[in-house]
Image (cartoon, grey):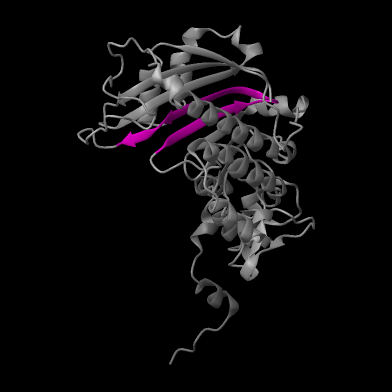
Amino acid sequence: MCPVRSDPIHRFHSLPLDHFDRLPDSLLLLIFNKIGDVKALGRCCLVSRRFHSLVPQVDNVLVRVDCVISDDDSSPSSSSSDKSRPAGPFSNLLRLVFGCIVKPLQALGQFLGPKRSLLNETVNAPSSSSSVGGGADDDDAEMGQAGVTHHSPTQVLRNFNEIRFLRIELPSGELGIDDGVLLKWRADFGSTLDNCIILGAASVINDVHSQVSEYGNDGFCSNNSITGNGDDNGSIPESFYTNGGLKLRVVWTISSLIAASARHYLLQPIIAEHRTLDTLVLTDADGQGALRMNRDQLEELRVKPLSASSASKRTQVPALNMRLWYAPHLELPNGVVLKGATLVAIRPSEQSASRKEVSDASWLSTAFEEPYGTAAKMLIKRRTYCLEMNSF
């Protein structure tokens, strides 16, 4: 009978081979960059010491914010009293601007404020999450209801040393719009607003064969509906000015600019700490708005401090030149119909004089994903209306 070998060398070779040990660091980093999501990367840190040392070198990171914690959440009585107040359509729009935007975005200040944390702390507890928090001044992670530990993106991102592409996704858009209403915006910032594009519609009909009401949500007859360029030569009907259509578009524009400038203001600590950034995008899960900054714009903000608004924690919006395109009824090639379709292109007054109008087609048509990119292309072929807005 042959004796059983029990020497250490034999036992070593009987262990299963870890194929990850055969992969070079560069390939592992490529995999981690494809993962991107900061929570998944945090879990990878717990796999091995090698993974733990490589994850901070990832240059493509996505941070999904799970929840918003506002100081107002502790006062349900005030919210219930607001719901019980009868109000007309325009007073509801005013609450949209000052109630649904300003207060939650002030809470975002604590959420994106600098705090101390380690990446592995974020994932050690199964209940940990990225959150928007308000009212906490301590340096440790916030403890929410049911013992859930909340960490801000600034906390987690401090553990990454070489971020080049950063995307932060809020759980929802700031603008509380009615069901069926379309409102999307995109804004580019340096130390101040570079440009903003807003696409809106009073309603979206996904079936082109659906019956269209004789009167649209803008309050005027829609029998003059057109597809793209119609016989009306892109003119806005007189009822648009008298029945609240223009007022509604002004509210959309101001609301979007407030949301964009608040997001920009709150990104300062992240931009200051991560000097390797090439691209930064702050968007939301609803796809409502996107703030974008490229490398030159990020460096401009580091060199030239932003001008903050005295009214709230947001970047001051400069004096603006705006161009507006409107179609009462816009039928897109895929069958989607936009009623009261509106496109607004915004640039600071200082820039507008040096910009060529011919750049509109490429600039505006690439701002939104399809089918809304096509909608923008169709709208800019119509008559242009110019507006101005003072700094605020």
Residue 23 x/y as whole percent: 52, 52
Q: For residue 321, which quarter of the picture?
A: top right
The residue sitting at the left extreme is 209
Query: Range of the magenta residues?
Result: 181-205
Q: Is 128 contained in the magenta span?
A: no
In the picture, the quarter occupied by the N terminus is bottom left
Quadrant of the rendered image containing residue 39:
bottom right
Residue 186 visible from this viewpoint:
no
Q: Quadrant of residue 216?
A: top left
Residue 60: x percent and y percent? 57, 42
Residue 35 in percent (x, y) is at 51, 49
At a point 22% along the width and 36% down the height, the residue shown is: 210
Say which quadrant the C terminus sits in: top right
Relative horizontal placement of residue 141, taking residue 383 as reference (left or right) = right
**Residue 353 visible (yes or no):** yes
Q: Is residue 357 above or below residue 344?
A: above
| Residue at the right extreme, as displayed | 138
Tell me how many marks there are: 0
